[in-house]
Image (cartoon, helix red, strand yellow):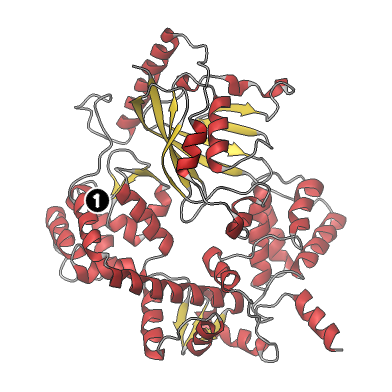
Amino acid sequence: MPKGYQLKITIQGSHPTIWRRVIVPEKITFYDLDDIIEAVFGWTHSHLFMFKVGDKRFEGSPYPEEDETTDSAAEPIDLWLYESAKLTYIYDFGDDWHHTILVEKIVDYEYRYPVVVKSKGPMMIEDCGGIWGFYGWIDEAEPFNQEQMNERLSKWHIDEAEIQDDQIRARDYALRERLVEHMKKISLSMQASADDRQLKRPEHLADIYAHYTVDDLRNIVKAFNIDGCAKLKKQELICRLTGELLSEKYFKEMILYSNPDEVQIFEDAMQEETIYTDETLIICSVLLSAYGGFVQLKEMYCVPEDVADAYKKLKTPQFEEEKERIDTLRTYCSSAVYLYGVCTLAQIQQFYEIYGRKPEESEWLHVQAEKLSAFGAPFSICDGYIMDDELAEENMYENVLKAQEDIPRYIPKEEDEFCLYGDLNCQEEDEQTAFFRRDLREKMGVSEPYDHMIFYEIQDEIRLNADMEDIFELLQAYGIRLKNVRHRNGFKSLVEKLRQYIRTWDLNGHMPAELAKMADSES
């Protein structure tokens, strides 16, 4: 029986995640796989692309017959794919779209065309500035119609790539050996054959905790403020934690006050046996590390069945309504703190009215904001104000309030724009600021993706009113050294130009250029 590969292809950096689950036939090339990916995400074959498989690179051009330097994508995929393999696909080296490709399983598949099994998220937008720019244009993104897409794909016929059976057998043997070595490194039991081992979610949270150290378990105890655990041994800690954490008292609060992005990853993991995700993200999230973990493969995260069952019981319409109210407050507070640094709950209440929402009661706002802050939301509450964590130190917020005294507050006309500041915690690149990254590349030789990173870090330094010496040090951290006074002055002028288009706390969320324009119109 002919075979196929079931792939889950995810747009890196998308929140909520945008992905497609696709079955592709065997014996196709990376060029064919590029055609499939571009079709299901809406790319238009307008840019170069590359697949990364470990340290191998398979590059391709939209015009392969005219570009002989990029024909490595003619390689058959079968020599590189196996169950649980992970690849990266990069499209458009300007906007720099990264896709993670996970080979979920190898299946019997008799057709010579691909099929989309499941999907989430809209079609993508060409030349919009990458993942950051995409969210500024997301309302214009076309919805993904799976039925129509599969009807279109069913008319394809992909010729079989020339590949010998002995090549595939050699590939299978080599990859099996690499997989076994990988499992040894992460201390998995080798009692079962690597070929027979399946990635499957555990039944119980206790099965996850069995892989944790005692220190890991005590950190969870500390995060949830559970008393009476100081003298418990590992198995006793596991019993106590699983009993407490699956109770509504702890579980409901954790879901309600966790970041929506973390809850989305949690829900994605419940829909699948396992999902690929960054281990650092899991470690930094109390929700994800306490209610799931990595059991079989280091990068494959799972949520056990008893946790998934508890979540299904918890997620009533009333619960979802309460979660939405709290998430709205989180976003409003985060956006206000990003733009102004510090504000009152009364001012937060005004945004509900400005954007046509039903105002919340003052007492509810205060209680929920306190809980959100306690659960790790990116703001502190001090002296009746909501503020950036840094401003809470030594009452620094008083200096910001003083600077803002005679400056009107910048209030975005649209709720989406206001919320985007809190959701992304940055100011997106636009036509006014695009010059900065362009000059980094063309005049200073900074390559992708470092021009992105430097742009957002310097933007943040400007927002926090850092001086030029701090910004020069930031450049040095990226290995960029300005050779002489002329180069330093040139870069300083570039930063000063950028400063005119960055919203700052001292200007109550305005850009300097906006205030200058307002002053000119008044005069």
Relative image position of residue 149 (x, y in whole percent): 50, 39
Q: Nearer the viewer, residue 148 or 141?
A: 148
For the N terminus, the quadrant is top left
Drawn side of residue 480 relative to residue 264, left or right: right
| Image-based side of 396 in relation to 168, left or right | right
Rendered location of residue 443, percent (x, y): 82, 48
Task: Please tell me which residue is depicted at 31% across the width and 31% down the height of the picture.
Answer: 183
| Mark 1, secondary structure of its residue | loop
Left or right, 359 with respect to 247, comes to: right
Q: Split into 4 quadrants, where in the image is the C terminus?
A: bottom right
Residue 320 visible in the displayed image:
yes
Quarter of the image where one finds residue 330? bottom left
Q: Image quadrant of residue 509?
A: bottom right
Q: Is residue 140 left or right of residue 17?
A: right
Numbered circles on residues, count: 1
Identity, as a three-letter code, of the amino acid under mark 1: Thr
Residue 110: quadrant of the picture: top left
Residue at x 41% of width, y 46% of height: 277
**What percent of the width, then of the height, locates residue 292?**
28, 52
Mark 1 crowd level (few <14, some 14–19, many ≥20, 10 Å Cα): few
Q: Nearer the viewer, residue 125 or 350?
A: 125
Q: Nearer the viewer, residue 191 or 367?
A: 367
The residue that appears at 21% across and 50% down in the rendered structure is 305
Mark 1, residue position: 213
- Visible residue check, residue 226: no
Residue 278 image offset from top left, x and y in percent: 43, 47
Rendered view: 502 above or below 13:
below
